[in-house]
Amino acid sequence: GQSLEQPSEVTAVEGAIVQINCTYQTSGFYGLSWYQQHDGGAPTFLSYNALDGLEETGRFSSFLSRSDSYGYLLLQELQMKDSASYFCASRPRNQGGKLIFGQGTELSVKP
Amino acid sequence: DAGVTQSPTHLIKTRGQQVTLRCSPKSGHDTVSWYQQALGQGPQFIFQYYEEEERQRGNFPDRFSGHQFPNYSSELNVNALLLGDSALYLCASSSATSDYEQYFGPGTRLTVT
């Protein structure tokens, strides 16, 4: 089976950098995705790591280390609008397009 | 270009009733997945449809069933509703060649009383 663990809450100030970690236990997966969800809204795709290393997309970067069963999402130059829940999700091998989500990390950005 | 749309946005049902939720995928997408999200939790995979067939199923009872139509739109049916079925039901669409990037609709908030 698969399970992903994330911190439940993170707080940071505007303009700062924050890292949201995701540790996982899996029997095999294609890659790790990150989604953002504002209160009551739809999750939106942020980033995907199929290979180990860093993927950069604007202010957001994501990292994966399969040997450490660990990944993280890095948010730079934090803005108030970044306050939201962030989910890591794995796509297990041989299970079609099924995504398994972590419990989510609620990020609060303070002025 | 319309994204993923879902209907209705909110629904209130009584225990034991049946409900049908609808989803239209993003233009160009052929795969639809359904997720259940309880308050404060991550989305839980219910099932995925591709080419009008159920391609993969999560750990949900047979009371949860679905369908995909030739135009790729999809329905989620839940029979014999329980209080515990109260949740946000999310539909996500993707292309079969890039399942890792799923586009989610705004969801249907189902309340069972």
Image (cartoon, coloured by chain):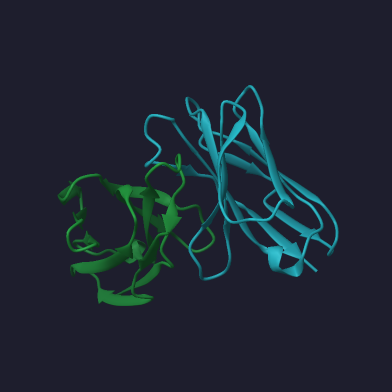
What is the quadrant of the N terminus of chain A in the image?
Answer: bottom left
B89 left or right, relative to B110: left
Percent coordinates x, y for residue B1 in the rendering: 48, 29
Q: Is residue A27 above or below residue B48?
A: below
A79 left or right, relative to B71: left
* Residue located at (18% from left, 70% from top): A16
* Residue located at (62% from left, 23% from top): B71
A77 left or right, relative to B96: left
Visible in this render: residue B71?
yes
A110 left or right, relative to A41: left
Q: Is residue B83 above or below residue A49?
A: below
Visible in this render: residue A111?
no
* Residue located at (38% from left, 55% from top): A89
Q: Residue furthest top?
A: B70
What is the quadrant of the C terminus of chain A in the image?
Answer: bottom left
* Chain letter of the cyan region: B
Q: Is residue B70 above or below residue B33?
A: above
Percent coordinates x, y for residue A70 in the rendering: 23, 63
Percent coordinates x, y for residue A26 in the rendering: 34, 58
Q: Colour of chain A?
A: green
Q: Residue furthest left?
A: A53
Q: Nearer the viewer, residue B80 or B88?
A: B80
Name which quarter of the figure residue B33 lies in.
top right
